[in-house]
Amino acid sequence: MLTKKKVRITLLLIFGVLILLNIIASKFFVRLDFTEDKRYSLSDATKNILKNLHDPITVTAYFSENLPPNIAQVRQDFRDLLVEYANKSGNMIVYEFVNPNETQESEIKAQQAGIRPIMINVRERDQIKQQRAYLGTVVQMGDKQEVIPFIQPGAAMEYDLSTTIKKLTVKNKPWIGFLTGNGEPSINEMPQLKEQLDILYNIDSVKIKADSTIPEKFKTLVIISPKDSLTEGQFTVLDNFLARGGNILVAYSAVDANMSTAMGNQVKSNFGDWLKKKGIEVDKNFLIDANCSTVMVKQQQGMFIFQTPVKFPYLPVINSFAKNPITEGLESVMLIFASPLKFNSLDTSIKITPIAFSSKKSGTEKPPVYFNAARSWSSADFTMGSLPVAAIAEGKLAGNKNSKLVVIGSGQFIINGSGQNAQQLEPDNVNFVSNAIDWLSDDTGLVQLRTKGVTARPIDPSLEDSTKTLLKYLNFLIPIFLVIGYGIFRYQMNLKKKNKLISENYV
Protein backbone atom coordinates (compact mmCIF):
# COMPACT_ATOMS: atom_id res chain seq x y z
CA MET A 1 0.00 0.00 0.00
CA LEU A 2 1.35 3.43 -0.97
CA THR A 3 1.93 5.80 1.90
CA LYS A 4 2.77 9.50 1.80
CA LYS A 5 6.31 8.65 2.83
CA LYS A 6 6.77 6.17 -0.05
CA VAL A 7 5.37 8.67 -2.55
CA ARG A 8 7.78 11.37 -1.35
CA ILE A 9 10.73 8.98 -1.52
CA THR A 10 9.72 7.85 -5.03
CA LEU A 11 9.40 11.44 -6.25
CA LEU A 12 12.75 12.37 -4.70
CA LEU A 13 14.39 9.39 -6.41
CA ILE A 14 12.87 10.35 -9.78
CA PHE A 15 14.12 13.96 -9.42
CA GLY A 16 17.52 12.66 -8.32
CA VAL A 17 17.79 10.39 -11.37
CA LEU A 18 16.74 13.22 -13.72
CA ILE A 19 19.34 15.58 -12.21
CA LEU A 20 22.02 12.89 -12.46
CA LEU A 21 21.12 12.18 -16.10
CA ASN A 22 21.32 15.91 -16.91
CA ILE A 23 24.76 16.15 -15.32
CA ILE A 24 25.98 13.09 -17.24
CA ALA A 25 24.45 14.36 -20.49
CA SER A 26 26.17 17.74 -20.11
CA LYS A 27 29.53 16.05 -19.62
CA PHE A 28 29.19 13.22 -22.13
CA PHE A 29 27.30 14.48 -25.21
CA VAL A 30 26.38 11.60 -27.51
CA ARG A 31 24.60 11.85 -30.83
CA LEU A 32 23.85 9.11 -33.33
CA ASP A 33 24.02 10.09 -36.99
CA PHE A 34 22.43 7.63 -39.43
CA THR A 35 22.54 9.91 -42.49
CA GLU A 36 24.42 8.57 -45.54
CA ASP A 37 26.87 11.47 -45.72
CA LYS A 38 27.20 11.89 -41.90
CA ARG A 39 25.62 15.31 -42.21
CA TYR A 40 25.24 15.79 -38.47
CA SER A 41 28.72 14.60 -37.51
CA LEU A 42 31.74 16.88 -37.36
CA SER A 43 34.55 16.04 -39.77
CA ASP A 44 38.13 15.37 -38.70
CA ALA A 45 39.10 18.70 -40.30
CA THR A 46 36.71 20.62 -38.05
CA LYS A 47 37.81 18.67 -34.97
CA ASN A 48 41.45 19.55 -35.72
CA ILE A 49 40.58 23.25 -36.05
CA LEU A 50 38.66 23.20 -32.76
CA LYS A 51 41.39 21.24 -30.98
CA ASN A 52 43.99 23.87 -31.88
CA LEU A 53 41.99 26.86 -30.64
CA HIS A 54 44.00 28.94 -28.18
CA ASP A 55 41.55 31.82 -27.78
CA PRO A 56 37.79 31.69 -27.21
CA ILE A 57 35.50 32.24 -30.21
CA THR A 58 32.15 33.99 -29.83
CA VAL A 59 29.40 33.18 -32.33
CA THR A 60 26.43 35.55 -32.44
CA ALA A 61 23.70 33.99 -34.56
CA TYR A 62 21.17 36.51 -35.91
CA PHE A 63 18.15 34.37 -36.75
CA SER A 64 14.57 35.55 -37.08
CA GLU A 65 11.84 33.54 -35.36
CA ASN A 66 8.37 32.38 -36.40
CA LEU A 67 9.46 31.57 -39.94
CA PRO A 68 8.00 28.91 -42.28
CA PRO A 69 9.05 25.38 -41.20
CA ASN A 70 11.53 24.80 -44.05
CA ILE A 71 13.42 27.98 -43.13
CA ALA A 72 12.99 27.64 -39.36
CA GLN A 73 14.76 24.26 -39.66
CA VAL A 74 17.94 26.14 -40.61
CA ARG A 75 17.95 27.80 -37.19
CA GLN A 76 17.55 24.43 -35.42
CA ASP A 77 20.27 22.79 -37.57
CA PHE A 78 22.65 25.67 -36.88
CA ARG A 79 21.95 25.49 -33.14
CA ASP A 80 22.66 21.72 -33.17
CA LEU A 81 25.89 22.39 -35.03
CA LEU A 82 26.98 24.99 -32.47
CA VAL A 83 26.27 22.57 -29.61
CA GLU A 84 28.65 20.10 -31.30
CA TYR A 85 31.29 22.81 -31.80
CA ALA A 86 31.03 23.93 -28.16
CA ASN A 87 31.40 20.36 -26.87
CA LYS A 88 34.28 19.39 -29.15
CA SER A 89 36.17 22.62 -28.45
CA GLY A 90 36.04 22.23 -24.68
CA ASN A 91 33.69 25.24 -24.50
CA MET A 92 36.12 27.45 -26.44
CA ILE A 93 33.15 28.19 -28.72
CA VAL A 94 30.55 30.37 -27.00
CA TYR A 95 27.34 31.18 -28.82
CA GLU A 96 24.12 33.13 -28.47
CA PHE A 97 21.03 33.54 -30.64
CA VAL A 98 19.54 36.97 -31.27
CA ASN A 99 16.19 37.65 -32.95
CA PRO A 100 16.79 40.87 -34.95
CA ASN A 101 13.04 41.32 -35.50
CA GLU A 102 12.43 41.61 -31.77
CA THR A 103 13.68 45.18 -31.34
CA GLN A 104 14.78 47.93 -33.67
CA GLU A 105 18.06 48.18 -31.79
CA SER A 106 18.99 44.51 -32.41
CA GLU A 107 17.99 44.82 -36.09
CA ILE A 108 20.25 47.85 -36.57
CA LYS A 109 23.04 46.01 -34.77
CA ALA A 110 22.66 42.99 -37.08
CA GLN A 111 22.75 45.15 -40.22
CA GLN A 112 25.74 47.13 -38.97
CA ALA A 113 27.54 43.82 -38.39
CA GLY A 114 26.98 42.90 -42.06
CA ILE A 115 23.99 40.55 -41.77
CA ARG A 116 21.80 41.14 -44.79
CA PRO A 117 18.01 40.72 -44.54
CA ILE A 118 16.03 38.66 -47.02
CA MET A 119 12.34 38.92 -47.91
CA ILE A 120 10.30 35.74 -47.50
CA ASN A 121 6.62 34.95 -47.92
CA VAL A 122 4.76 34.11 -44.70
CA ARG A 123 1.14 32.91 -44.45
CA GLU A 124 -0.82 34.67 -41.69
CA ARG A 125 -4.61 34.49 -41.24
CA ASP A 126 -5.07 32.99 -44.72
CA GLN A 127 -3.08 35.81 -46.26
CA ILE A 128 0.37 35.84 -47.78
CA LYS A 129 2.59 38.65 -46.59
CA GLN A 130 6.25 39.42 -46.95
CA GLN A 131 8.48 39.41 -43.88
CA ARG A 132 12.04 40.61 -43.48
CA ALA A 133 14.12 37.74 -42.10
CA TYR A 134 17.71 37.27 -40.95
CA LEU A 135 19.76 34.06 -41.24
CA GLY A 136 23.34 35.15 -40.61
CA THR A 137 26.01 35.03 -37.99
CA VAL A 138 28.99 36.96 -36.67
CA VAL A 139 32.10 35.10 -35.51
CA GLN A 140 34.53 36.98 -33.24
CA MET A 141 37.93 36.21 -31.79
CA GLY A 142 39.37 39.04 -29.74
CA ASP A 143 39.18 42.20 -31.85
CA LYS A 144 38.92 40.23 -35.13
CA GLN A 145 35.55 39.56 -36.67
CA GLU A 146 34.17 37.65 -39.68
CA VAL A 147 30.60 37.58 -40.95
CA ILE A 148 28.52 34.91 -42.64
CA PRO A 149 25.86 37.26 -44.10
CA PHE A 150 23.36 34.59 -45.06
CA ILE A 151 23.13 30.86 -44.36
CA GLN A 152 21.39 29.28 -47.31
CA PRO A 153 18.92 26.50 -46.43
CA GLY A 154 20.54 23.21 -47.43
CA ALA A 155 23.99 24.79 -47.68
CA ALA A 156 27.19 23.36 -46.23
CA MET A 157 26.98 25.03 -42.79
CA GLU A 158 29.96 23.18 -41.35
CA TYR A 159 32.18 24.33 -44.21
CA ASP A 160 31.07 27.96 -43.77
CA LEU A 161 31.57 27.94 -40.00
CA SER A 162 34.84 25.98 -39.97
CA THR A 163 36.43 28.05 -42.73
CA THR A 164 35.35 31.26 -40.98
CA ILE A 165 36.95 30.10 -37.72
CA LYS A 166 40.07 29.03 -39.61
CA LYS A 167 40.20 32.41 -41.33
CA LEU A 168 40.23 34.09 -37.90
CA THR A 169 42.89 31.79 -36.48
CA VAL A 170 45.21 31.22 -39.44
CA LYS A 171 48.38 33.31 -39.34
CA ASN A 172 49.83 32.64 -42.79
CA LYS A 173 47.48 31.79 -45.65
CA PRO A 174 48.99 29.75 -48.52
CA TRP A 175 49.60 31.50 -51.85
CA ILE A 176 47.95 30.36 -55.07
CA GLY A 177 49.31 31.57 -58.43
CA PHE A 178 47.27 31.98 -61.63
CA LEU A 179 49.35 31.78 -64.80
CA THR A 180 48.79 34.71 -67.20
CA GLY A 181 50.42 36.04 -70.37
CA ASN A 182 49.67 33.11 -72.69
CA GLY A 183 46.04 33.79 -73.55
CA GLU A 184 44.68 32.77 -70.12
CA PRO A 185 41.82 34.75 -68.52
CA SER A 186 42.62 37.00 -65.59
CA ILE A 187 41.43 36.04 -62.12
CA ASN A 188 38.95 38.93 -62.31
CA GLU A 189 37.11 37.03 -65.06
CA MET A 190 36.45 34.23 -62.54
CA PRO A 191 34.79 36.11 -59.64
CA GLN A 192 32.89 33.08 -58.31
CA LEU A 193 36.08 31.03 -58.01
CA LYS A 194 37.99 33.98 -56.54
CA GLU A 195 35.31 34.52 -53.88
CA GLN A 196 35.65 30.93 -52.66
CA LEU A 197 39.44 30.89 -52.74
CA ASP A 198 39.80 34.22 -50.91
CA ILE A 199 38.66 32.53 -47.69
CA LEU A 200 41.70 30.32 -47.28
CA TYR A 201 44.28 31.62 -49.75
CA ASN A 202 46.21 34.61 -50.95
CA ILE A 203 45.86 34.86 -54.74
CA ASP A 204 48.15 36.49 -57.28
CA SER A 205 48.84 36.27 -61.00
CA VAL A 206 52.11 34.75 -62.24
CA LYS A 207 53.94 35.45 -65.50
CA ILE A 208 56.84 33.24 -66.46
CA LYS A 209 59.73 33.83 -68.82
CA ALA A 210 62.34 31.42 -70.07
CA ASP A 211 64.92 32.43 -67.49
CA SER A 212 62.56 33.05 -64.57
CA THR A 213 61.43 30.96 -61.60
CA ILE A 214 58.08 30.76 -59.90
CA PRO A 215 58.41 32.44 -56.47
CA GLU A 216 58.83 30.08 -53.53
CA LYS A 217 55.71 31.42 -51.79
CA PHE A 218 53.42 29.70 -54.32
CA LYS A 219 52.38 26.23 -53.30
CA THR A 220 50.04 25.66 -56.24
CA LEU A 221 49.89 27.05 -59.78
CA VAL A 222 46.56 27.25 -61.65
CA ILE A 223 46.57 27.26 -65.46
CA ILE A 224 43.20 28.01 -67.06
CA SER A 225 42.70 27.68 -70.81
CA PRO A 226 46.01 28.86 -72.33
CA LYS A 227 45.37 29.84 -75.97
CA ASP A 228 48.93 30.60 -77.05
CA SER A 229 51.96 28.36 -77.28
CA LEU A 230 54.63 28.46 -74.57
CA THR A 231 58.35 28.41 -75.24
CA GLU A 232 60.54 25.49 -74.22
CA GLY A 233 62.07 27.80 -71.61
CA GLN A 234 58.65 28.43 -70.06
CA PHE A 235 57.92 24.69 -69.93
CA THR A 236 61.27 24.27 -68.16
CA VAL A 237 60.08 26.78 -65.54
CA LEU A 238 56.93 24.68 -65.01
CA ASP A 239 59.05 21.50 -64.74
CA ASN A 240 61.32 23.17 -62.19
CA PHE A 241 58.22 24.14 -60.17
CA LEU A 242 57.05 20.50 -60.15
CA ALA A 243 60.59 19.31 -59.39
CA ARG A 244 60.66 21.30 -56.14
CA GLY A 245 57.32 19.77 -55.03
CA GLY A 246 54.91 22.36 -56.41
CA ASN A 247 51.48 21.29 -57.64
CA ILE A 248 49.63 22.36 -60.79
CA LEU A 249 45.97 22.46 -61.82
CA VAL A 250 45.30 22.62 -65.57
CA ALA A 251 41.87 23.26 -67.11
CA TYR A 252 42.53 22.93 -70.81
CA SER A 253 40.62 21.89 -73.91
CA ALA A 254 42.35 21.22 -77.21
CA VAL A 255 39.33 22.63 -79.08
CA ASP A 256 37.50 25.94 -79.00
CA ALA A 257 34.36 27.48 -80.47
CA ASN A 258 33.60 30.77 -82.14
CA MET A 259 29.85 31.23 -81.69
CA SER A 260 29.73 34.28 -83.95
CA THR A 261 30.60 32.00 -86.90
CA ALA A 262 29.14 28.83 -85.30
CA MET A 263 32.45 27.06 -85.97
CA GLY A 264 34.67 24.94 -83.75
CA ASN A 265 38.37 24.41 -84.33
CA GLN A 266 41.52 23.08 -82.70
CA VAL A 267 43.35 25.35 -80.28
CA LYS A 268 46.70 26.37 -81.73
CA SER A 269 48.70 25.85 -78.56
CA ASN A 270 51.47 23.39 -77.75
CA PHE A 271 50.34 23.08 -74.12
CA GLY A 272 48.82 19.65 -74.83
CA ASP A 273 52.26 18.37 -75.88
CA TRP A 274 53.65 19.23 -72.43
CA LEU A 275 50.73 17.46 -70.71
CA LYS A 276 51.28 14.40 -72.94
CA LYS A 277 54.82 14.11 -71.56
CA LYS A 278 53.28 13.84 -68.08
CA GLY A 279 51.16 10.87 -69.21
CA ILE A 280 47.86 12.70 -69.85
CA GLU A 281 46.82 13.48 -73.41
CA VAL A 282 44.02 15.94 -74.13
CA ASP A 283 42.25 14.61 -77.23
CA LYS A 284 42.08 17.11 -80.11
CA ASN A 285 38.40 16.33 -80.76
CA PHE A 286 35.15 17.74 -79.39
CA LEU A 287 33.45 15.63 -76.72
CA ILE A 288 29.72 15.16 -77.42
CA ASP A 289 27.37 13.70 -74.84
CA ALA A 290 23.66 12.81 -74.90
CA ASN A 291 23.53 13.97 -71.27
CA CYS A 292 24.00 17.65 -71.99
CA SER A 293 22.82 21.18 -71.31
CA THR A 294 20.67 23.27 -73.64
CA VAL A 295 21.01 26.44 -75.69
CA MET A 296 18.21 28.84 -76.54
CA VAL A 297 17.28 28.88 -80.21
CA LYS A 298 14.92 31.33 -81.93
CA GLN A 299 12.00 29.63 -83.67
CA GLN A 300 9.34 31.41 -85.69
CA GLN A 301 5.72 30.29 -85.55
CA GLY A 302 3.55 32.46 -87.76
CA MET A 303 4.18 36.05 -86.85
CA PHE A 304 5.75 35.21 -83.52
CA ILE A 305 9.34 34.35 -82.58
CA PHE A 306 9.93 32.10 -79.58
CA GLN A 307 13.09 31.23 -77.66
CA THR A 308 13.17 27.42 -77.37
CA PRO A 309 15.67 25.37 -75.33
CA VAL A 310 17.45 22.81 -77.51
CA LYS A 311 19.82 20.11 -76.30
CA PHE A 312 23.41 20.88 -77.27
CA PRO A 313 25.75 17.84 -76.88
CA TYR A 314 28.85 20.06 -76.98
CA LEU A 315 27.94 21.13 -73.40
CA PRO A 316 28.24 17.78 -71.58
CA VAL A 317 26.80 17.53 -68.07
CA ILE A 318 29.04 15.36 -65.92
CA ASN A 319 27.31 13.25 -63.26
CA SER A 320 29.72 10.32 -63.06
CA PHE A 321 32.61 10.71 -60.62
CA ALA A 322 35.19 8.40 -59.08
CA LYS A 323 35.40 8.36 -55.29
CA ASN A 324 37.98 11.04 -54.55
CA PRO A 325 38.26 14.08 -52.20
CA ILE A 326 38.09 16.38 -55.26
CA THR A 327 34.74 15.01 -56.40
CA GLU A 328 33.25 14.40 -52.94
CA GLY A 329 29.63 15.60 -52.89
CA LEU A 330 29.58 16.89 -56.47
CA GLU A 331 26.27 16.34 -58.23
CA SER A 332 26.52 17.96 -61.65
CA VAL A 333 29.30 19.79 -63.51
CA MET A 334 28.61 21.37 -66.89
CA LEU A 335 31.64 21.44 -69.19
CA ILE A 336 31.87 23.77 -72.18
CA PHE A 337 33.42 22.56 -75.45
CA ALA A 338 35.42 19.87 -73.69
CA SER A 339 37.92 17.29 -74.86
CA PRO A 340 38.19 13.74 -73.50
CA LEU A 341 41.45 12.58 -71.93
CA LYS A 342 43.74 9.69 -72.81
CA PHE A 343 46.50 8.18 -70.70
CA ASN A 344 49.88 7.07 -71.98
CA SER A 345 52.29 7.11 -69.04
CA LEU A 346 55.08 4.52 -69.19
CA ASP A 347 56.70 5.84 -66.00
CA THR A 348 55.81 3.52 -63.12
CA SER A 349 56.67 6.24 -60.58
CA ILE A 350 53.62 8.25 -61.77
CA LYS A 351 50.14 7.19 -60.73
CA ILE A 352 47.31 8.46 -62.94
CA THR A 353 43.69 8.27 -61.75
CA PRO A 354 40.67 9.40 -63.81
CA ILE A 355 38.11 11.11 -61.54
CA ALA A 356 35.27 12.32 -63.80
CA PHE A 357 33.54 10.76 -66.80
CA SER A 358 31.02 11.56 -69.48
CA SER A 359 27.80 9.53 -69.68
CA LYS A 360 27.55 6.13 -71.32
CA LYS A 361 26.11 7.81 -74.42
CA SER A 362 29.15 9.83 -75.56
CA GLY A 363 31.24 10.34 -78.65
CA THR A 364 33.73 12.69 -80.29
CA GLU A 365 33.74 14.93 -83.36
CA LYS A 366 36.83 15.96 -85.22
CA PRO A 367 37.22 19.71 -85.89
CA PRO A 368 36.48 21.80 -87.81
CA VAL A 369 32.86 21.51 -86.69
CA TYR A 370 29.84 23.56 -87.73
CA PHE A 371 27.41 23.93 -84.82
CA ASN A 372 23.92 23.33 -86.14
CA ALA A 373 21.51 23.80 -83.24
CA ALA A 374 18.65 22.35 -85.33
CA ARG A 375 20.51 19.08 -85.92
CA SER A 376 18.66 15.89 -85.02
CA TRP A 377 20.82 13.68 -82.83
CA SER A 378 20.43 9.91 -82.62
CA SER A 379 21.98 7.03 -80.70
CA ALA A 380 24.35 6.47 -83.64
CA ASP A 381 26.09 9.74 -82.69
CA PHE A 382 27.00 8.49 -79.19
CA THR A 383 28.73 5.14 -79.61
CA MET A 384 31.92 5.52 -77.52
CA GLY A 385 30.56 4.97 -74.02
CA SER A 386 31.88 6.72 -70.93
CA LEU A 387 35.00 8.86 -71.52
CA PRO A 388 37.32 10.38 -68.88
CA VAL A 389 37.23 14.20 -68.72
CA ALA A 390 39.35 14.83 -65.60
CA ALA A 391 42.28 13.03 -63.98
CA ILE A 392 45.00 13.40 -61.36
CA ALA A 393 48.66 12.42 -61.69
CA GLU A 394 50.83 11.85 -58.61
CA GLY A 395 54.50 10.99 -58.28
CA LYS A 396 57.81 12.17 -59.72
CA LEU A 397 56.36 14.29 -62.53
CA ALA A 398 59.66 16.17 -62.88
CA GLY A 399 62.82 15.71 -60.83
CA ASN A 400 63.02 13.52 -57.73
CA LYS A 401 60.36 15.13 -55.53
CA ASN A 402 56.76 13.99 -55.55
CA SER A 403 54.22 16.46 -56.88
CA LYS A 404 50.61 16.46 -58.03
CA LEU A 405 48.89 17.46 -61.26
CA VAL A 406 45.14 17.80 -61.89
CA VAL A 407 43.95 18.00 -65.50
CA ILE A 408 40.38 18.89 -66.56
CA GLY A 409 39.52 18.62 -70.27
CA SER A 410 37.72 21.97 -70.47
CA GLY A 411 39.01 25.46 -69.85
CA GLN A 412 35.88 27.53 -70.40
CA PHE A 413 33.66 25.91 -67.77
CA ILE A 414 35.13 27.92 -64.88
CA ILE A 415 35.24 31.34 -66.59
CA ASN A 416 32.45 33.83 -65.84
CA GLY A 417 33.72 36.33 -68.40
CA SER A 418 33.42 40.08 -68.12
CA GLY A 419 31.14 42.94 -69.12
CA GLN A 420 27.89 42.10 -70.89
CA ASN A 421 29.15 38.58 -71.68
CA ALA A 422 29.58 37.64 -68.00
CA GLN A 423 27.62 34.54 -67.00
CA GLN A 424 26.67 32.83 -63.75
CA LEU A 425 28.26 29.41 -63.34
CA GLU A 426 26.72 26.30 -61.88
CA PRO A 427 27.78 25.98 -58.19
CA ASP A 428 29.40 22.59 -58.75
CA ASN A 429 31.57 24.01 -61.56
CA VAL A 430 33.15 26.30 -58.97
CA ASN A 431 33.17 23.59 -56.29
CA PHE A 432 35.00 21.22 -58.66
CA VAL A 433 37.91 23.62 -59.23
CA SER A 434 37.94 24.84 -55.61
CA ASN A 435 38.06 21.25 -54.37
CA ALA A 436 40.94 20.49 -56.73
CA ILE A 437 42.91 23.53 -55.53
CA ASP A 438 42.18 22.60 -51.89
CA TRP A 439 43.39 19.05 -52.55
CA LEU A 440 46.57 20.38 -54.12
CA SER A 441 47.23 23.07 -51.53
CA ASP A 442 45.41 22.57 -48.30
CA ASP A 443 46.20 19.96 -45.66
CA THR A 444 43.25 20.60 -43.35
CA GLY A 445 40.77 18.29 -45.08
CA LEU A 446 38.23 21.12 -45.47
CA VAL A 447 37.91 20.11 -49.12
CA GLN A 448 35.46 17.39 -48.06
CA LEU A 449 33.17 19.88 -46.33
CA ARG A 450 32.44 22.29 -49.18
CA THR A 451 29.75 20.13 -50.71
CA LYS A 452 28.51 18.65 -47.43
CA GLY A 453 24.84 19.45 -47.00
CA VAL A 454 24.10 19.91 -50.68
CA THR A 455 20.90 17.94 -51.26
CA ALA A 456 20.15 18.57 -54.94
CA ARG A 457 19.47 15.08 -56.28
CA PRO A 458 17.45 15.46 -59.48
CA ILE A 459 15.75 12.43 -60.99
CA ASP A 460 17.88 10.69 -63.61
CA PRO A 461 17.28 12.81 -66.77
CA SER A 462 17.56 9.71 -68.99
CA LEU A 463 14.34 8.25 -67.50
CA GLU A 464 11.08 8.46 -69.43
CA ASP A 465 8.65 11.20 -68.39
CA SER A 466 6.06 8.59 -67.34
CA THR A 467 8.65 6.89 -65.08
CA LYS A 468 9.58 10.26 -63.52
CA THR A 469 5.90 10.98 -62.81
CA LEU A 470 5.41 7.53 -61.27
CA LEU A 471 8.46 8.00 -59.00
CA LYS A 472 7.19 11.41 -57.86
CA TYR A 473 3.78 10.01 -56.88
CA LEU A 474 5.31 6.95 -55.17
CA ASN A 475 7.64 9.21 -53.20
CA PHE A 476 4.62 11.23 -52.05
CA LEU A 477 2.11 8.43 -51.43
CA ILE A 478 4.17 5.57 -49.95
CA PRO A 479 4.74 7.27 -46.52
CA ILE A 480 1.01 8.05 -46.32
CA PHE A 481 0.07 4.42 -47.12
CA LEU A 482 2.57 3.15 -44.54
CA VAL A 483 1.02 5.34 -41.81
CA ILE A 484 -2.52 4.29 -42.78
CA GLY A 485 -1.46 0.62 -42.93
CA TYR A 486 0.11 0.83 -39.48
CA GLY A 487 -3.10 2.44 -38.14
CA ILE A 488 -5.26 -0.39 -39.59
CA PHE A 489 -2.88 -2.99 -38.14
CA ARG A 490 -3.09 -1.39 -34.66
CA TYR A 491 -6.87 -1.20 -34.93
CA GLN A 492 -7.14 -4.89 -35.82
CA MET A 493 -4.85 -5.90 -32.97
CA ASN A 494 -6.83 -3.87 -30.44
CA LEU A 495 -10.08 -5.27 -31.81
CA LYS A 496 -8.80 -8.82 -31.33
CA LYS A 497 -7.79 -8.10 -27.73
CA LYS A 498 -11.18 -6.54 -27.03
CA ASN A 499 -13.07 -9.52 -28.51
CA LYS A 500 -10.92 -11.92 -26.52
CA LEU A 501 -11.62 -10.10 -23.25
CA ILE A 502 -15.34 -10.00 -23.99
CA SER A 503 -15.29 -13.72 -24.81
CA GLU A 504 -13.43 -14.65 -21.54
CA ASN A 505 -15.72 -12.51 -19.37
CA TYR A 506 -18.73 -14.03 -21.03
CA VAL A 507 -17.47 -17.61 -20.32
Image (cartoon, grey):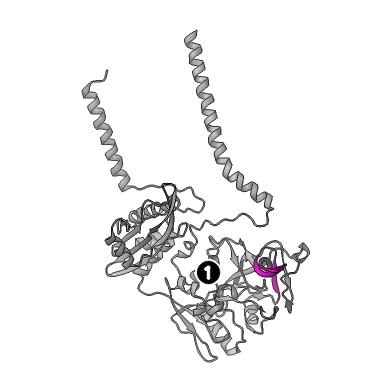
Q: Is residue 305 visible?
A: yes
Where is residue 121 shown, x and y percent of the image? 44, 55
Q: Main secondary structure of the magenta part?
A: strand
The residue at 31%/40% (across/down) is 21
Residue in front for this viewpoint, 35 or 471: 471
Q: Is 485 included in the stretch rendered in magenta?
A: no
Q: Residue furthest bottom?
A: 211
Residue in front for this viewpoint, 101 or 85: 101
Taking the image as shown, residue 27 lies to the left or right of residue 319, namely left
Q: Is 303 included in the stretch rendered in magenta?
A: yes
Q: Is residue 483 placed above or below 409 in the rendered structure?
A: above
Picture quadrant where residue 52 is located = bottom left
The residue at 60%/89% (across/down) is 231
The residue at 48%/53% (across/down) is 38
Helix, strand or loop at mark 1? helix
Q: Is residue 263 placed above or below 111 in the rendered structure?
A: below
Residue in front for this viewpoint, 312 or 16: 312
Q: Residue furthest front?
A: 303
Magenta residues?
285-306
Assess disc 1: are there few (<14), some (14-19) or many (≥20) residues with their C-alpha within 10 Å of its C-alpha: many
Residue in front for this viewpoint, 126 or 222: 126
Q: Which residue matches tag 1? A: 430
Q: Residue furthest right?
A: 380
Q: Is residue 44 visible?
A: no
Taking the image as shown, residue 387 lies to the left or right of residue 403, namely right
Q: Amino acid at mark 1?
A: Val
Where is residue 153 shown, x and y percent of the image? 45, 57
Picture quadrant where residue 2 is located = top left
